[in-house]
Image (cartoon, grey):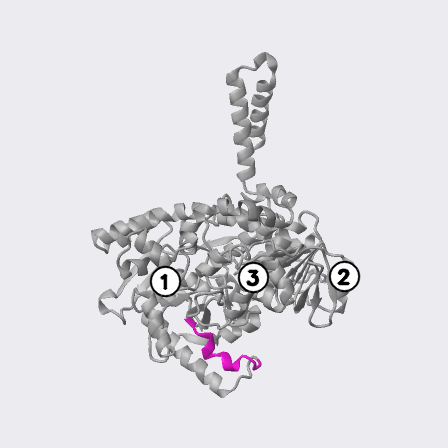
Amino acid sequence: ASPFAWASTMKLTLQALDTSKMTPLNVGIGISAFTLALGLWIKMPRAPLLSEADARRHFNHLPHTEPREEQEEDSNWKPPHRTRYSKKMAAAAASMKPDVIIVGSGLGSLTVGSLLSQRGWKVLILEQHDQAGGCLHTFEEKGYEFDVGLHYIGGKVGSRWSSLRKVYDAVTGGRVEWCKLDDPYDTAVCTGEHNAGEKETFNFYGDYGRTEAEIRSKLTAEEGEAVGRFFRSLDVSMIRMGGWLLNKALPVWLRRSLGRLIELPSAGVLNVTTESYMKDSLGCATAKVRGILTYLFGDYGLMPSASAWGVHAVVFNHWKGGAFYPYGGSSALAMGACEVIRKNGGLVLVNARVKRIVVEAGRAVGVEMEKDGTIFKSGTIVSDVGARNTFVRLMEEEDAKLAVGPDLVADLKVGEAGDLREHGKMAPSCALLNLFLGLDAPAAELGVPATNAWVVPGWDHDANLQKFWEDDGENSELPVTFIGSNSAKDFSYDKRFGKNRGSLMVLAPVEYRWFKKWESKRVHARGEDYEQLKKFWEEKLLRKLYQVYPQVEGHITYKDLGTPLSNNHYLGVNHGEVYGLTHSLDRTWRHRDGLSCRTNVKGLHLTGQDVMTAGVSAALMAGVMTVGAISKTALVSHVHNLV
């Protein structure tokens, strides 16, 4: 890891190769020293791909109300994630003769594009929205900035030696820093409306030993033992998922011949629900214990009685070591990745909606644009717009059936109800309300820390949801509410927006069917009855916020409610879903082969959340796996950047 270390290593290695000194001891020392040095070299952080000047330009392009940093003007520089599709750019895209075309620009897409472009591949990414990044999107209104998809990241990304941090750096250019949230990073608040005796709060720390001890101190001895078994099972469950993950990137023929053997250990964690596993395997006998330990089921959007245990274990274990937030907000990640692609000769185009994936004789050969009918040709097509959009909307039915089989295509069509109760088959994941709030003081001054609050009316999450559905949410309590402040998490917020303001978000699940009748209406033109519906939900969310943080009342100077229809417009989904397909056993197990990086249509690949599980980091790793499915050489050449 340093010139001195390498010199010492080479000396020991040469001594081992010197026949006059080739004793077993010398050979052993030489091999050990070389292996250690190689391991350190692979593991050590890499130098940033982007320059400090690039980082300053990106930061200055972020929304500001305060003066920006001074720097040399470059009239030719344009933000890399906002290049609009036009006749000129279409001609440039065609002339580059792309080696790979990627539909959608979520983090899975940007990962594939960034890593392949660094190895000489000509990359073209096509995004329907007006900025690239998918759920990395942020927006500014009235002097406040809000995130829409990335609320916190685990994986110990605060350390440059973290494997996950190395992947983020390799994809985004290595200039994005990470702000550590407070500890606890999450707090689970039961307000007790469904059971007054359950009104209590539990904290979740980066040190899981501390978390376990604090939870056990509030429970009976028997319940405490179950909590201990839960925490001990997390790492084991993740290891058992290894075969399932490996199968995602294997060639189709190899997956068919050896796949079932490879993924055999995974069945016990992905073909069983969270509730069943916790009851039967971990001995979590009471709904209270299960409810406390599944407080963050909103991170993947499906109740414990229907979600796959393996998904819950992965999501829960992700926060070991604490939680982090990107300095400058999540769009800083998108800008970095797009800049890497641009510097390596690629193109990321926005306002570029794809009409269909062109398949000829069982091979994907290009994409057709919706705006002008232009067809871009390439032998490698990657879709990062979700399985439903890919196989139901962008492909002819016969081509889709060839790609992933008729059963998956049929289930994707059946599961379009957009109803949380449709947790079988392949329904869309949950739809959310997003209440964006601007404050006239920093969040911390109003008692809101850099900690996320998960608020429930009782610890039985399934019962909470059932009561919510029974009266269409009108009089019942919100089944779960997420409250977080990006201004408290992002250390750059004060620098960009001043010290006398803050921002908050309040999120809660709803049924898409409650909003469906307005889906054909234009944004900001859906009528008075729609505005009244929004006002009803806005007031409901505010009541929950004031219940947890009463100091905020009277300090809100801006508010706007995003509904599932907002998600349709900005994320290119169809039922307001935020996590792709629902995380049911059908998704994780029954249709695991169809939801892989490779399809049976030659040249067509998938990436993003539907390949893996919910979350930004899952999309990142899906991108890495898709790179391996496309080019083993490209993936192997990046090993030292990704481990």
Residue 94 tag number: 2
Q: Amino acid at mark 1?
A: Ser
Q: Is residue 519 one of those drawn in magenta?
A: yes
Q: Is 409 situated above or below 30?
A: below
Residue assigned mark 1: 305
The answer to whether 414 appears left or right of 104 in the picture is left
Q: CA distance from mark 1 to mark 2?
A: 49 Å
Quadrant, the N terminus: top right
Answer few, some or many: residues within 10 Å of disc 2's Cα (few below 14, many 20 plus, some between 14 and 19).
Answer: some
Q: Amino acid at mark 3?
A: Ser
Residue 455 is situated, as x and y percent measured from the top left of the image, at: 34, 66
Chain-order first, disc 2 or disc 3: 2
Given residues 143 and 523, the one toward you in this image is: 523
Residue 438 is situated, as x and y percent measured from the top left of the image, at: 46, 72
Q: Is residue 526 visible?
A: yes
Q: Amino acid at mark 2?
A: Ala
The answer to whether 404 appears left or right of 514 in the picture is right
Q: CA distance from mark 1 to mark 3?
A: 35 Å
Which residue range is magenta in the image?
509-522
Residue with the most extreme top position? 20
Given residues 304 and 137, the one toward you in this image is: 304
Residue assigned mark 3: 331
Residue 397 tag number: none
Does the residue at mark 2 contact the one at mark 3 (Cβ under 8 Å)? Answer: no
Q: Secondary structure at mark 1?
A: loop
Chain-order first, disc 1 or disc 3: 1
Residue 84 is situated, as x and y percent measured from the top left of the image, at: 68, 67
Q: Is residue 554 visible?
A: no
